[in-house]
Amino acid sequence: FFGPRGDLLATTDNAVAVYDAGGRERFRFDVEDLLDVAPVGTELWAIAGNRLVRHAATDGAHLGSDVIGYLDPAGRFMLSATAAIPVWHAARPVAIRTGPVRTETPGPGGDAILPIAEGRWLLWQAGQLRLWRSIGEAWRRPVGEPGMRPLDAQLVLEGRLFVLAQQRAAQIGEQAGELRLSIAAVSDGAQHAVLRMPGVEQLVFAARRGLAGARAGDRLSIVDLRFGRWLRDLALPAGTTHVAVDDTLQMIAIVGPDGVDLVRPDALAAPLLGSPE
């Protein structure tokens, strides 16, 4: 979900589609060799091979295509909730800039980089989180598991808390490995809480409300990141392959074999514990 109207961005193969809050398709366009796409301000940025392709977020009009150089094809966009500076999250993450189109590494870089604002970055590497400014390092604190690569990261509650997501490799018989969320204050790096959840296949953030959703099978567990506690479980339809939430958790997009459905959380009854298969 993105923008003031709560539009939904979806991709299938090389096609990019935007739906309105009622689930009606507004427009679509194709991008050859598409790796990922993300909303950036009033534009949609797509990485296609070694090019940055830009389209208008209002109507899909093509705005430009520029060579950006090599980006790890195993990477993806990671967006901060507080700064419109997209990050290509990969083994060596970089920020993507325009004017001219280029990649940048803030400060010494890290295994995860996330902008707070222009000139202020959170950098995580090997169990150390640091606040980096244009004049240098402001603080450094131990956060997360040093030996685990970061899966995702986000700023929540209008930038007051930083969340680092790490996941261990799945063991034999597991659909997915255990997910670990480390939550720290942006002001000084003090760790607030650590959450561990087994078998998580997908993680989503409702950043403005400070909530996260962890999908495991047909269950979406909602957790409060401020207090580090589970709130409720939502039952997902059979065959769900992907979910997305808006930044206040007022709407959930559910992707399944029949397409995309937009529902409110209250429409997803909590699964019954111990119910028969």
Image (cartoon, helix red, strand yellow):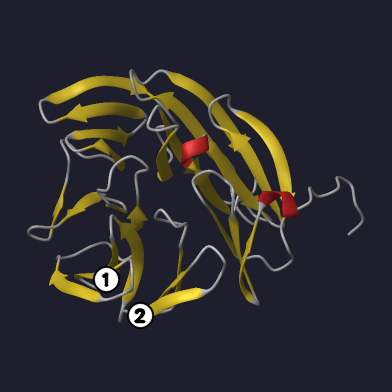
Q: Is residue 96 above or below residue 117?
A: below
Q: Residue 192, percent across and down?
A: 49, 21
Q: Badge 1 local density, few (<14 within 10 Å), some, or many (20+)?
A: some
Relative to 207, is 188 on the left or the right?
left
Q: Position of residue 39 (x, y in %)?
A: 34, 59
Locate residue 97: give its quadrant.
Answer: bottom left
The picture quadrant where one finds residue 27 is bottom left
Q: Are the residues flagged by discs 1 and 2 in contact, CB closer than 8 Å? A: yes
* Quarter placement of the C terminus: bottom right
Q: Residue at x 18, y 65 (%)?
A: 70
Q: Which residue is mark 2?
A: 29
Residue nearer the viewer, 167 or 269: 269
Q: Is residue 78 above or below residue 51?
A: above
Question: Is residue 89 or residue 257 the one in the foreground?
Answer: 257
- Circle 2 Cα neighbour tier, 10 Å, few/some/many (<14 / 14–19 / ≥20): some
- Where is residue 263? Give x, y as percent: 65, 59
Q: Could you tell me residue 107's position as x and y percent?
A: 15, 36
Amino acid type, residue under disc 2 in the picture? Phe
Q: Amino acid at mark 1?
A: His
Mark 1 lies on a secondary structure that is strand
The tally of labels here is 2
Q: Quick check: can you spot residue 185?
A: yes
Q: CA distance from mark 1 to mark 2?
A: 9 Å
Question: Mark 1 or 2 closer to N-term?
Answer: 2
Residue 55 badge: 1
